[in-house]
Amino acid sequence: MPPPIPDHPHHLLPLPNGDLHYLQEGDGDDTVLLIHGSLCDYRYWRWQMPALAERYRVLAPSLRGCWPINHPHPQPGYRIDAHARDLVHLAQALDIRQGLHVIGHSRGAQVALSFATQAPDLCRSLTLADPGFRFDDEPESRPFYTHAVEQLQAGDIDGALEDFIDTVNGADTWRKMVAWFKDMTRDNAATLLSQILEANTPVTQRDAAALACPLLLVGGANSPAKYGARQDRLQQLHPQAQRVRIALAAHGMNLANPRAFNRAILDFIDSVRIPAAR
């Protein structure tokens, strides 16, 4: 299979009950793990991989159940904790003993936090970009993409994607999106049929408070308020956490303003790795 992003070799890691597809670039002493969110796959990081790989080794997996895997949904194994276990397997298979700088966006932020909880020794730093999870002391709520799932089940794929994307990123976003992004979300549209089954999976306050690695919270300046509220609460638990707002961007901040997003990530990793190198 040719790589979807030029000059980014495609790799395959066999796992129990499936395979993990990932991209890898760079050969720095430190390793960065990029975890995409809903409706995405490793193609989502097309503007991050070359920039981060100038200094670091970069891994970008497609979470199991996402493109290029093409199995029907819903899938019982499409879960936050299962995704995190897959990524622990990846780190162990690649013998990354010194740990990773883990970056998760949106749903991927909850996967990233689960990774840090499952394998704290493998997480050297944690970046959560617009996390949207609920905490365990908050009531369950109707998933915002319930209507999108209904549209998807009725066969209206583009209508479902427009509903989802415009909700998280602002009205009329879908219409303005570039062709490659639309193709990626179409390839992953069926994952919503699995995702809605775990939509209210909470993060426990205990797990969030127990994070011991350096933490960066990233938000889009124009993102919906709920994402900022998650960051506010995480910062209450971790007052020492760094925080950055990406100007001229909403939820898809790494695509809308990749230069600012990449700079924030690089500055953070540089700041937390220098003491360890002395």
Image (cartoon, helix red, strand yellow):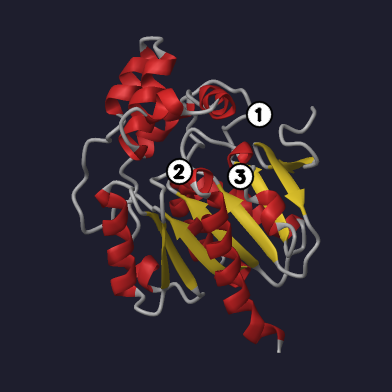
Residue furthest to the left: 139
Determine whether the residue tagged by mark 3 lies in a helix, strand or loop. Answer: helix
175 versus 249 height, above or below: above
Q: Quick check: can you spot residue 90?
A: no
Q: Amino acid at mark 3?
A: Trp
Q: Quick check: can you spot residue 27?
A: yes
Q: Amino acid at mark 1?
A: Pro
Q: Earlier in the sequence, mark 2 or mark 3?
A: 3
Residues tagged 3 and 1 counted as in contact (Cβ below 8 A): no
Determine whether the residue tagged by mark 2 lies in a helix, strand or loop. Answer: loop
> Is 178 situated left or right of 156 in this image?
right
Residue 156, given in percent of the width and then of the height, sits at 39, 12
Select label 3 or label 1 by which is in front: 3
Which residue shows up at 28% across the image and 27% down it? 146
Q: Earlier in the sequence, mark 2 or mark 1?
A: 1
Residue 11, given in percent of the width and then of the height, sits at 78, 41
Q: Nearer the viewer, residue 262 or 197?
A: 262
Neighbourhood count class around disc 3 (C-alpha, 10 Å): few under 14, some 14–19, many 20 upward = many
Neighbourhood count class around disc 2 (C-alpha, 10 Å): few under 14, some 14–19, many 20 upward = many
Residue 212, given in percent of the width and then of the height, sits at 48, 77
Residue 234 sits in quarter: bottom left
Residue that numbered label 3 is attached to: 45
- Quarter of the image for the N terminus: give it: top right
Residue that numbered label 2 is attached to: 252
Residue 208, given in percent of the width and then of the height, sits at 38, 67
Q: Amino acid at mark 2?
A: Gly
> Is 26 situated left or right of 213 in this image?
right
Distance between mark 2 and mark 3 Cα atoms: 11 Å
Residue 135 sits in quarter: bottom left
Residue that numbered label 1 is attached to: 68
